[in-house]
Amino acid sequence: MNPSKIANTFAGERQMIYSNKTISNHIDYLADAFLISKASRYDIKGRKYIGANLKYYFADLGLRNARLNFRQQESTHIMENIVYNELLIRGYNVDVGVVEVFDKDKSGRRVRKQLEVNFVVNQGNQRYYIQVAYDMTSEEKQMQEFNSLRNIPDPFKKIVIVNGSKKPWRNDEGFVIMGMKYFLLNADSLEF
């Protein structure tokens, strides 16, 4: 939820003008009522919080779905939201990670890109980097999910949670891959 995007949606689709401040206030009211939760963005390489572009998750997906009349069933986002809520229930501090990398564009010029890590999860001196992927059957999707984890320069555990009931296993790069069902049913699933 980005206040600017929400304001633009109201302006474009409903011809209603709201300021970013008004939208931000309403988002804060929803957070104060525990209907949504804010996750801060964390620069993993720079080891600092980025003040802009918080990410929001619904505390109760049933209320979200009912409000939308059970439309907009985006499995990927819903799965990510469920993992976020479960991590909070388990007592972790959860942020959204950003990894800055340099790549080449089509003309061969070096460009800066930011890759998202779904969750940077902390509890005491433990840290986990978690990607959530509904479907990883294509090579392209695997590259997308693994690429941000590959560019994290520290030894903390890197986990990919996928749809299904897959038991945890490690790939050749040392990433732990586990099914959503296994993650939800095993409180110690991150310790694999």
Image (cartoon, helix red, strand yellow):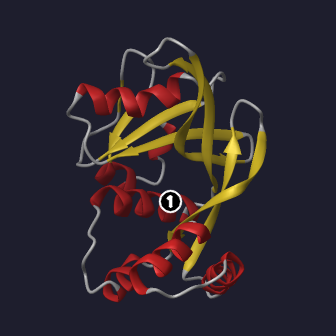
Please report the residue visible at 74 percent of the width from the left and 40 percent of the height from the top: 125
Q: Position of residue 68 (x, y in %)?
A: 32, 83
Please report the residue visible at 48 percent of the width from the left and 48 percent of the height from the top: 188
Please report the residue visible at 34 percent of the width from the left and 40 percent of the height from the top: 178
Query: Is 169 situated left or right of 119 in this image?
Result: left
Q: Is residue 24 visible?
A: yes
Image quadrant for the C terminus? Answer: top left
Q: In the rendered view, would you say 84 is above or below 67? A: above
Q: Is residue 1 visible?
A: no
Q: Residues within 10 Å of mark 1 (few under 14, many from 20)?
A: many
Q: In the rendered view, would you say 172 is above or below 101? A: above
Q: Residue furthest left?
A: 137
Q: In the rendered view, would you say 173 is above or below 32? A: above
Q: Position of residue 130 (x, y in %)?
A: 50, 42
Q: Please name the amino acid that badge 1 sits on.
A: Tyr
* Disc 1 secondary structure class: helix
Q: Position of residue 83 (x, y in %)?
A: 44, 57
Query: Is 51 situated left or right of 73 in this image?
Result: right
Residue bearing mark 1: 84
